[in-house]
Image (cartoon, rainbow, N blue to C red):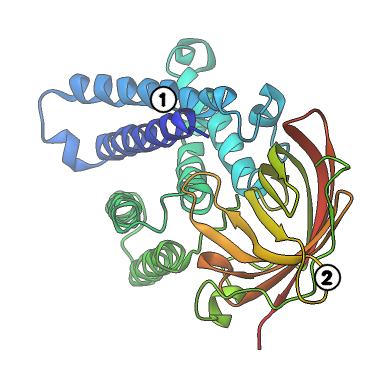
Amino acid sequence: MNHEFWYLSRAAGFTAYIALFASVALGMMMTTKVAQRTRRQQLVFDMHRFLAVLAVAFSLFHVYVLLGDHFFNFSVWQLSVPFASPYRTLAVAVGVVSLYALLLVTASFWVRKWIGYRTWRALHFITFVMYAGVTLHGVTAGTDTTQAWARLLYLSTGLVVLGLLAYRLQYRLPTSEAWRWARIAAGSAAAVFTLGIIGGTQVVFPNPSSSTQATVASTTASTAGAPNSQAAAGGGAFLASFSGTVNGTFTQKTGEDSSALSMQAQVAGDLPAKLNIDLAMQQGGDDGRAQVSTNSAQLLDPATNAVLCDGQLTSFDNGNASLVCTGAGPYAGVRMTIQATFAAADATTVTGDLSGQMTRLS
């Protein structure tokens, strides 16, 4: 499946974030001696406002271009209402609330003469919470957070904003010794918190016909990578239980002495993923029973196709399947046991439900 809309959304998200950072930085500079040293303060204000509008435009595109993505099949409701998204619900909810805050602050530029300067200034204080929310959304919901360049972007912009905030407070708060140490302590705590989020966050990607009947002997799932219990214990990767819906396609070939089934499906729910199943059997073994020649079951990241869990079917009978797989990437050190029920909608498409549990490998 192609992911053009997913890529467009990611690109627009980073563009919006950079525009927002530049707007926030210029806005903070205007309230300090930095901007007061230039004679073109009106130009700085115009750029501050223009970049805010640019951030709104790219943010809206970042969100609603996903209506064209047919992996999750987002609805307008899921993209517009906090906690309605099936993909990384909490992280996306933070982004939705932050978008509404950005719309409110940006709109205030044009209603300033009606609401008054004090109210307008008060609304602008929302910017600090909004910017923190946007950063948190990008770090926890973005599929690029594990990339060095993305972490460097979040880290550098975050430190610049914190530096400007500290510089601004330097001229707004009393100059007594107690206040000076309070500023140092608050700035240090904020810097440590920012570094902790950006440096320690693990991204969770987050996220047959009735003629086919087979029972596959229980096997130990193949290991996709060395267990990493530390990764499994942190970053929100571990889900004691999860459930979702399955929609996909399958192909089935049956011969006199062999049969094969291949399925590629999309899983939506607590653990968004791609589910790939390949099963092939040969008839007429030494004991007269069917012998399994191919048995593979994988969960893949929906955006990057990276393996999240690699294993095998333990049973497959009349559309009821069980599989066990060993986690990789953000799920390293985790074993998943999954049960699914499939029904063929027609000769090539399949729908169903699945549920599963995660256990940590010792």
Mark nearest the camera among 2 and 1 is 2
Residues packed near mark 2 inside 10 Å, few (<14), some (14 to 19) or many (20 plus): few
Q: Position of residue 66 (x, y in %)?
A: 55, 28
Q: Amino acid at mark 1?
A: Phe
Write down the residue under mark 1.
58
Q: Image quarter for residue 76?
A: top right
Q: Quadrant of the C terminus?
A: bottom right
Q: Which residue is more in the foreground, 104 or 111?
A: 104
Residues packed near mark 1 inside 10 Å, few (<14), some (14 to 19) or many (20 plus): many
Image side of residue 219 versus residue 87, left or right: right
Q: Position of residue 105 (x, y in %)?
A: 49, 27
Q: Position of residue 202 (x, y in %)?
A: 50, 64
Q: Residue at x 65, y 29 (%)?
A: 74
Q: Earlier in the sequence, mark 2 or mark 1?
A: 1
Q: Which mark is residue 288?
A: 2
Q: Amino acid at mark 2?
A: Gly
Q: Which residue is more in the foreground, 332 or 163?
A: 332
Residue 221, placed above or below residue 5: below
Residue 72, placed above or below residue 304: above
Q: Which mark is residue 103?
A: none
Q: Are marks 2 and 1 in contact (CB under 8 Å)?
A: no
Mark 1: secondary structure: helix
